[in-house]
Image (cartoon, rainbow, N blue to C red):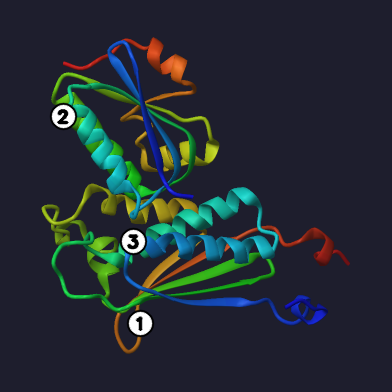
């Protein structure tokens, strides 16, 4: 479907519900990248956004596949772009962020946690302008990431 | 894009050329490729990431694991990185200090194999 109505109106946001499986992490990062691209985010920033989304979703997966655990609830992702910023929420119903990337070092069971999981939060902090991890109602944990960029100079000129 | 892996032998060194995206889904294949090389006796490995479109911490973890694996056998694992977006990930995590990073396969092959 095409039509001028698709070009107008408020900026589209995203709401994704992804099975908690590694195969879907790629879908998450490319979908958020498409949104950022639609809003003229610079390409190098889009790469940062892709990596941050990938890290957040991977952290929400928890243990690697095949650990014999029970099936996980879907990971929810929302993203919205507005003048000069993209706000991304990754919501993990199981609250695994707390254990895998947000816990105090003494709380992290290093026998249980692969090395790469320890890199996730430092990487995210290095990529986005703001990151916050908070409890989500009624349960779970939400990681909010905000990336800022220069708004479209043409649209913003006066 | 899926992950493509190709190995070529250059004297004592094996070049593992990686194309595509390395993430939590594809990284196990890279891990297995490195394990297979080491099990087959290759302890001097160059991982060519020139054609890698995406790398995350899972991929970094696999590379660190591979580095440990070859070093315990007296070898080394170096990496060819030409793209700023990939290099940036090594720099943010500080892993640019852990690996020998090269700007071409030729440069990596010219480096003498280190290790104990």
Residue A13: x percent and y percent?
A: 59, 77
Image point 30% across, 37% down: which residue? B63
Residue B10: x percent and y percent?
A: 35, 14
Q: Is residue B13 left or right of residue B116?
A: right
Which numbered dot is residue A136?
A: 1
Q: Residue furthest right?
A: A158
Chain at tag 3: A
Q: Residue furthest bottom?
A: A138
Give the quarter of the figure containing the C terminus of chain A: bottom right
Locate residue B29: give its quadrant: top left
Q: Secondary structure at mark 3?
A: helix
Chain at tag 2: B
Q: Secondary structure at mark 2?
A: helix
Within-10-Å neighbours for mark 1: few <14, some 14–19, many 20+? some
Q: Residue under circle 3?
A: A22
Residue B90: x percent and y percent?
A: 40, 38
Q: Is residue A155 left or right of residue A150?
A: right
- Spatial distance from mark 3 to mark 2, Cα to Cα? 27 Å
Chain at tag 1: A
Q: Residue furthest left?
A: A111
Q: Verify CB contact (< 8 Å) between mark 3 and mark 2.
A: no
- Residue A66's place in the image compared with B101, above or below, is below
- Spatial distance from mark 1 to mark 2, Cα to Cα? 46 Å
Locate residue A35: give its quadrant: bottom right
Image point 17% across, 22% down: which residue? B41
Locate residue A99: give its quadrant: bottom left
Q: Is residue B74 left or right of residue B30?
A: left
Q: Secondary structure at mark 1?
A: loop
Which numbered dot is residue B39?
A: 2
**The one of B73 and A68 positioned closer to us in this rendering:** A68
């Amino acid at each position: 479907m095409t039509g001028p109505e698709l070009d107008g109106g408020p900026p589209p946001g995203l709401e994704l519900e992804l099975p908690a499986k590694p195969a879907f992490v790629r879908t998450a990062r490319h979908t958020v990248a498409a949104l950022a691209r639609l809003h003229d985010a610079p390409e190098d920033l889009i790469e940062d956004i892709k990596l941050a989304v990938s890290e957040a979703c991977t952290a929400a997966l928890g243990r690697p596949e095949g650990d014999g655990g029970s099936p996980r609830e879907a990971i929810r992702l929302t993203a919205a772009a507005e003048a000069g910023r993209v706000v991304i929420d990754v919501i993990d119903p199981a609250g695994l962020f707390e254990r895998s990337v947000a816990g105090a070092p003494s709380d992290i069971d290093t026998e249980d946690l692969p090395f790469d999981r320890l890199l996730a939060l430092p990487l995210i902090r290095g990529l986005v302008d703001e990151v916050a991890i908070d409890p989500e109602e009624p349960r779970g944990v939400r990681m909010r990431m905000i990336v800022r960029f220069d708004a479209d100079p043409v649209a913003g000129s006066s | 894009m899926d992950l493509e892996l190709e190995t070529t032998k250059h004297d004592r060194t094996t070049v593992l050329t990686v194309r595509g995206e390395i993430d939590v889904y594809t990284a196990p294949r890279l891990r297995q490729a490195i394990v297979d090389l080491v099990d087959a006796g290759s302890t001097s490995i160059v991982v060519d990431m020139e054609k890698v479109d995406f790398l995350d911490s899972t991929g970094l973890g696999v590379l660190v694991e591979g580095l440990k694996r070859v070093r315990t056998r007296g070898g080394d694992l170096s990496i060819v990185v030409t793209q700023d977006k990939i290099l940036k990930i090594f720099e943010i995590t500080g892993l640019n200090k852990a690996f020998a990073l090269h700007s071409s396969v030729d440069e990596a092959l010219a480096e003498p194999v280190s290790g104990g």
